[in-house]
């Protein structure tokens, strides 16, 4: 893996989305620092990912101690808890992270994420649903 200054990415939240994202980045030869507050999740993925650490990402001090401020890109992959995702983006904004990516579960969630400083907001469930709909429709054309 390359140095954190150029190719490093922090992934916060190792649910299904965060875990697959972290794995894909690692396979693309990016250094990944993965963070989750649940010790069981950390334990589960520590054999598969290079650096997995346990911390509450809503705590700015904890993020600073982990060296998150040295990374140019951070992805907040927390989905279910709007509060945790918003507070985490806020902490990252305080750290001055240049590229904050965040996962939203609704349009209102996305608005809040933008307002607290997220630079990019993604909707994994909505985007995948749309993509699969297009795949189905394009496959149907094969039979006409
Ligand atoms: P997915 O849909 O990706 O499977 P999920 O529904 O299992 O996600 P979420 O609530 O979206 O779970 O959380 C994703 C991960 O984020 C979980 O592993 C959870 O422990 C972690 N997480 C939640 N809050 C925090 C936090 N404050 N700091 C760090 N990690 C957190």
Image (tube, helix red, strand yellow):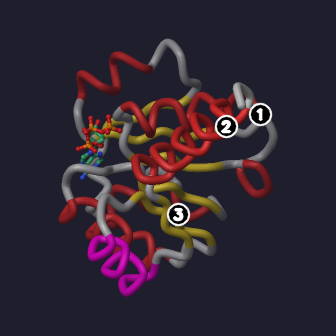
Quarter of the picture containing the N terminus is top right
> Residue 101: which numbered mark, if any?
3
Quarter of the picture for ligand 1?
top left
Q: Are marks 2 and 1 in contact (CB under 8 Å)?
A: yes
Residue 3 part of the magenta-drawn span? no
Between residues 121 and 140, which one lies in front from this camera angle? 140
Which residues are the magenta region?
107-117
Identify the element where label 3 is drawn.
strand
> Residue 55: which numbered mark, if any?
none
Between residues 78 and 98, which one lies in front from this camera angle? 78
The residue tagged 1 is 28
Residue 69 % position (x, y): 54, 64
Is residue 51 shown left or right of residue 79? right
The residue tagged 2 is 25
Residue 13 % position (x, y): 36, 43
**Mark found first going from the N terminus, 2 or 3:** 2
Residue drawn at the location 18% of the way across and 65% of the way down: 83
Identify the element where label 2 is drawn.
helix
C-alpha span from label 2 to label 3? 14 Å
């Amino acid at each position: 893996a390359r140095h954190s200054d150029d190719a490093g990415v922090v992934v916060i939240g190792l649910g299904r989305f965060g875990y697959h994202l972290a794995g894909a980045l690692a396979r693309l030869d990016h250094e990944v620092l993965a963070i989750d507050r649940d010790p069981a999740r950390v334990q589960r993925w520590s054999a598969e990912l290079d650096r997995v650490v346990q911390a509450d990402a809503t705590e700015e001090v904890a993020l600073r101690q982990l060296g998150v401020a040295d990374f140019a890109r951070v992805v907040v992959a927390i989905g279910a808890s709007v509060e945790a995702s918003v507070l985490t983006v806020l902490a990252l904004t305080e750290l001055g992270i240049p590229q904050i990516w965040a996962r939203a579960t609704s349009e209102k969630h996305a608005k809040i994420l933008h307002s607290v400083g997220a630079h990019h907001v993604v909707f994994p469930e909505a985007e995948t649903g749309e993509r699969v709909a297009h795949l189905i429709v394009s496959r149907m054309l094969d039979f006409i």
